[in-house]
Amino acid sequence: MKRILAFLLVIFFLAACVHNKYASTNKSYKKQVKNYAKLLREYPVKDSAGLQYADNWVGTTNFSMRRPNFVIIHHTAQDSCEQTLRTFTLPRTAVSAHYVVCEDGTVHHMLNDLLREHHAGLGKWGSVSDMNSCSIGIEIDNNGSEPFTEPQMNSLLQLLDRLKKAYNIPQANFIGHMDWAPGRKVDPSRYFSWQILAEKGFGFWYDTTNVEVPADFNALQALRIVGYNINNPEIAIQSYKIHFVPQDTTKVITDADKKILFDLLKKYQ
Ligand SMILES: [Zn+2]
């Protein structure tokens, strides 16, 4: 009887260990959230300095939490969801995402949507220069040289639908990491179908049937108006191609691109 009990205890502890694999990093999550909550509880509000403050503090009664206005899609460039979960729970990597979508369609929600994660890094889109502060980051488990799976795309579409509705995110504001950081990032790869997303209302796609491009059309300015940082035209074109013309690996604007951009311009401006 004692032996059976001991055996059961061992099984119980083993199960507990497996279950609590991320117990210590979850504890760190909770601690950090607690610190931010503490910050929010501070009054009088004193997070700006050097002003001539009124003697009596008056807090408004009408407010809510700030909400994300963009969604940035990535591929993990790693070999498994487990590897990515580990990366996002090691402080030294300093990278994270709100969501990780695994190959089998499982979704890990790693951070509250209202908190700022570290996924976008340096970049520019339109006049936005701090994407981490205004976006949701979604990492799709994919090594960058393979197609995305059907369960994964289904989960992603479901997730995008929820985010779009919950935060009233404009259709134009669903973009890729490479759109945000041309030259520095190339994810999600050319295997990712932005056309499927656009058909469901996440980002825009184009229809070049009967499109006539005016002779003075400036394709580079069109790229800028869509959102791309055109300081370095070649890498801006590369990111545009990954997104909108994945079969074309060149970095030059063709007549076909002019038609595409002329049509996209109407949607993005
Ligand atoms: Zn990325």
Image (cartoon, rainbow, N blue to C red):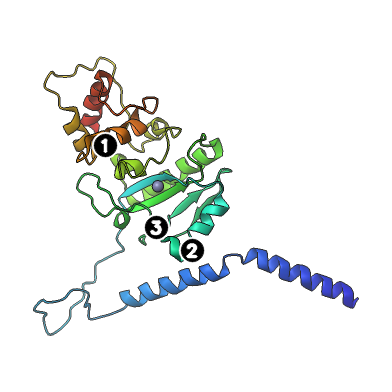
Q: Is disc 3 in contact with disc 1, using a CB cutoff of under 8 Å?
A: no
Q: Which of marks 3 and 1 is in front?
A: 1
Q: 258 or 30, which lies in front?
A: 258
Residue, x 51% and y 72% (percent of image)? 27
Task: Look at the image and tell me whether residue 16 can be seen.
Answer: yes
> Which of disc 1 and disc 2 is earlier in sequence?
2
Q: The residue under label 2 is which amino acid type?
A: Leu
Crowd tier of the residue under label 2, counting other residues whose Cα lies within 10 Å: few below 14, some 14–19, many 20 or above: few
Relative placement, left or right, of 220 versus 1 is left
Relative placement, left or right, of 206 versus 111 is left
Residue, x 14% and y 84% (percent of image)? 56
Crowd tier of the residue under label 1, counting other residues whose Cα lies within 10 Å: few below 14, some 14–19, many 20 or above: many
Crowd tier of the residue under label 3, counting other residues whose Cα lies within 10 Å: few below 14, some 14–19, many 20 or above: some
Q: Nearer the viewer, mark 2 or mark 3?
A: 2
In 3D space, how far apart are the residues under numbered discs 3 and 1 (Cα atoms)? 29 Å
Rendered position, 53 above or below 206: below
The residue singled out by tag 1 in the image is: 236
Rendered position, 66 above or below 158: below
